[in-house]
Amino acid sequence: MAGLAALVAGQDDAPAVLLLPGFTGSKEDFVTILPLLAAAGLRAVAVDLRGQYESVPDADGPDSQFTVDALAADTVLAAAELGGRVHLVGHSFGGLVARAALIAHPTALASVVLLGSGPAAIVGPRRLALRALIALHAQAGLAAVWEGVRAVDTVVRSPEEVEFLRRRFFASSERGTLAMGAALLAEPDRVADAAAVAAAHAIPLLVTHGVGDDAWHPGMQAEMATRLGASYAVIPDALHSPAAQNPAGTAGVLIAFVHGAIAGLSTPTFPTPGATAEVA
C-alpha cells in the first residue's frame, strides 16, 4: 500500500479508517483495536510509516523522505489506494503526520483524529529523554540506545513482547528513526493552519488522549482541540498509548466519532467511561 506495510481488518467496501503509529511505533500498536473497528462496520488499516519496522525506505534516498511532510505524502498515496476519502487517525508523532496530510491534501480526508498528539514539538520529560537518546546514539550507537530505552521502560512486559520490541527497533531504519526523532523535537505549531483548512473543507476533527497522557499534557491537548474547533474526548484508564492500554475505550471513541462524521453530526456522542461501546 504505497510501499507501506499494513494490517487490515474489515470489509473492502466499508468506510476506511487509516491509522498512523507514533515515533518508534508500528502498525502492531493498533492490533487490539482493529477487530473492534471492523466489528463496527469500518475497514481498519494500520500502517508502518516509511522507515518503521516493515515499511522499507529508499536506501539511496535522502533523509528528507522521513520528514513530516514527506510521510504525509506517503499517507495520502496510501489513502488513495483505499478508494474514496479516508478517516485518518494519527497517534503521537503520527498525529503530526496526519495534521500535515490535512493541511496539504484535505480532499483526501473525510475526518482526522489526533490521538495523544500535540500542537508542536514534544515537550517535558519525553523531550529531555529523546534528546538524551539522540546524544547517546552519537556517542555509542544504536545498540546502546536500545539498552537505554529498555532501562527507562517501567511497563511490565512478557519476554515475547520484549523480543518483538527488540526486533522492531532493529528492523526499523536507523536513519529514519533519527530523522523522525529530530522532527519530533522541531515540529512547529501548525494548529491555525490545520483549523483553517478543516473549516474551509468541512472536515470533522477529534482530539483524544488517555486521561494520564505523559507526553503532551492533557491540558495542552484540550487547548489544542479548542483552537482547532475539534471534538474532544478523554479515554479513561490509559496513558500515552490508549490503543494498547484501553482498547475498548479507545475503539469506542473512534467508532463514535467516525460514525458521527459519516452521519454529518457536528457533535458526536461518545461512550460513557466504563461503558461498552455500541457497535453496528
Image: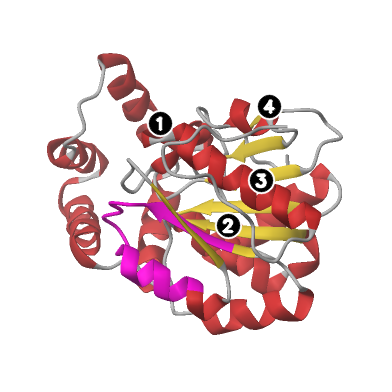
Q: Which residues are magenta?
A: 206-225
Residue under label 1 = 168
Q: Are marks 4 and 3 in contact (CB under 8 Å)?
A: no
Specify the amino acid type for callout 1. Arg
Specify the amino acid type for callout 2. Val
Indicate whether residue 58 is drawn in magenta: no
Residue under label 4 = 39
Per the model, the C-alpha gap separating discs 4 and 2 is 19 Å
Indicate whether residue 221 is drawn in magenta: yes
Specify the amino acid type for callout 3. Leu
Q: Earlier in the sequence, mark 4 or mark 3?
A: 3
Closer to the camera: disc 4 or disc 2? 4
Q: Are marks 3 and 1 in contact (CB under 8 Å)?
A: no
Q: Are marks 1 and 2 in contact (CB under 8 Å)?
A: no
Quadrant for the C terminus in the image:
top right
Residue at 22% over, 51% down: 137
Per the model, the C-alpha gap separating discs 1 and 2 is 25 Å
Q: Residues within 10 Å of mark 3 (few under 14, many from 20)?
A: many
Return the residue nearer the eye: 159 or 137. 159
Identify the secondary structure beneath mark 2: strand
Residue 113 disc label: 2
Q: Position of residue 41 (x, y in %)?
A: 75, 33
Per the model, the C-alpha gap separating discs 4 and 1 is 28 Å
Per the model, the C-alpha gap separating discs 3 and 1 is 21 Å
Specify the amino acid type for callout 4. Ala
Identify the secondary structure beneath mark 1: helix
Q: Position of residue 56 (x, y in %)?
A: 57, 39
Q: Position of residue 169 (x, y in %)?
A: 36, 35
